[in-house]
Image: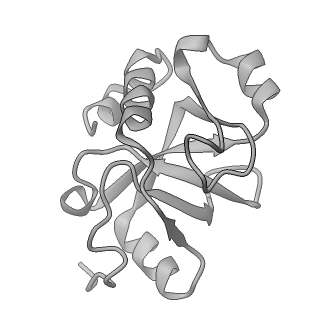
Amino acid sequence: MAALPSAITWLSPGDVIFLSSRTLTDERKHWFVVVNKTPLSDSIVLAAVCTSNIERIRRFSHPETIVEITPEEYSEFDKLTSVDCNDPKLMPLEELVERHKTGEVKICKRIPAEILEKIIKSIKASPRVEERKKDLI
């Protein structure tokens, strides 16, 4: 495994990363919340996608699988943001490390524990999330 830069060695549940995802159709950068228990030893990061497109998420998702976060709850967000808990993304840790080295990945402050717990509960409640992903949390 690649030597981890100091910013990655503390990657843990609740950390928020900002990057463009190769698994999304939209190439813009998005916020992601790391949700797996042990991303460093798993060598894979499971992360829930955040969006400010609240209405789209509300229209296509069951309320139990959405977590909305206000800027007062998490200051990195400048508007109401929704976490889509129906399709958390898998990202190879080594790829994340390489992209961090090139400046493609920004690691932000950790999301409050109570919000992380809501996200995890919502992922577990989603019938669309595969068991192999749920097993990581």
**Residue at position x 76%, y 61% in the image:** 28
**Left or right of residue 69, residue 5 in this image:** left
Left or right of 16: which side holds 133? left
Q: Nearer the viewer, residue 110 or 121?
A: 110
**Residue at horizontal 58 percent and vertical 84 percent from the top:** 103
Q: How is the image coloured?
A: one colour
Instruction: Name which quarter of the figure residue 43 lies in.
Output: bottom left
Query: The N terminus appears in which quarter of the rendering?
Result: bottom left
Task: Indicate whether 4 appears above or below 129.
Answer: below
Q: Up-down: is 121 above or below 135?
A: above
| Residue projecting furthest to the front | 72
Q: Quadrant of residue 11?
A: bottom left
Image quarter (top left, top right, bottom left or bottom right) of the C terminus: top left
Residue 39, horizontal then vertical, whole percent? 28, 56
Q: Position of residue 86 (x, y in %)?
A: 54, 27
Q: Is residue 100 above or below residue 85?
A: below
The count of marks equals 0
Q: Which residue is painted at 42% across and 26% down in the image? A: 118
Give residue 30's position: percent from left, percent from top.
66, 55
Residue 117 spot, x, y in % from top left = 36, 31
Q: Please tell me which residue lies in front, 91 or 35.
A: 35
Depth order, front residue of 26/30: 30
